[in-house]
Amino acid sequence: MIFTPVLSEATATGAWRTGWVTDAVGQDLANLDGWKAYVAGPPAMVDAAQDLLTQRGLRADDLHADVFFTPETGATAEA
């Protein structure tokens, strides 16, 4: 297994890549047939990852995702 940290915004240089993680995956991996993917993040990131991964051959059953939602501003709890 290889771990490659990817930071969307970095204020300093280091042993990581910068940009979107989906861009890094797209640059590094051409064929994901037989792989498993575990994705967690905001809806737009998970959607982008799903699109890229399935285009690269990942089967839908091999994609596991946890979407992070932020509560809407001003929302109130119902009692």
Image: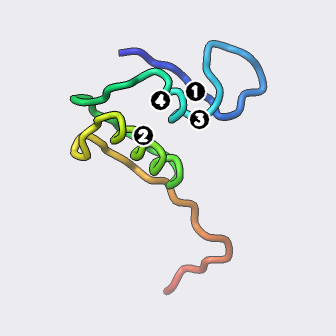
Viewer-side residue, 35 vs 72: 35
The residue where tag 3 is placed is 20
Q: Nearer the viewer, mark 2 or mark 1?
A: 2
**Would you name the residue on which mark 2 appears?**
52
Residues at marks 3 and 2, CA–CA distance in whole angstroms: 12 Å
Give the Cα separation between the discs numbered 4 and 2.
7 Å
Residue occupying image coordinates x 28% and y 37%: 58
Residue 31, image x, y percentages: 32, 26
> Which residue in the protein does label 4 denote?
26
Residue depicted at x 58% and y 27%: 6
Q: Is residue 42 above or below residue 75?
A: above
Q: Name the element at disc 2.
A: helix
Instruction: Provide residue 57's location: percent of width, then percent of height.
Output: 29, 35
Under mark 1, the amino acid is Val
In this rendering, the label closer to the viewer, 3 or 2 = 2
Q: Amino acid at mark 3?
A: Trp
Mark 1 is surrounded, within 10 Å at the Cα level, by few (under 14), some (14 to 19) or many (20 or more) other residues, namely some
Mark 1, residue position: 6
Q: Nearer the viewer, residue 78 or 37?
A: 37
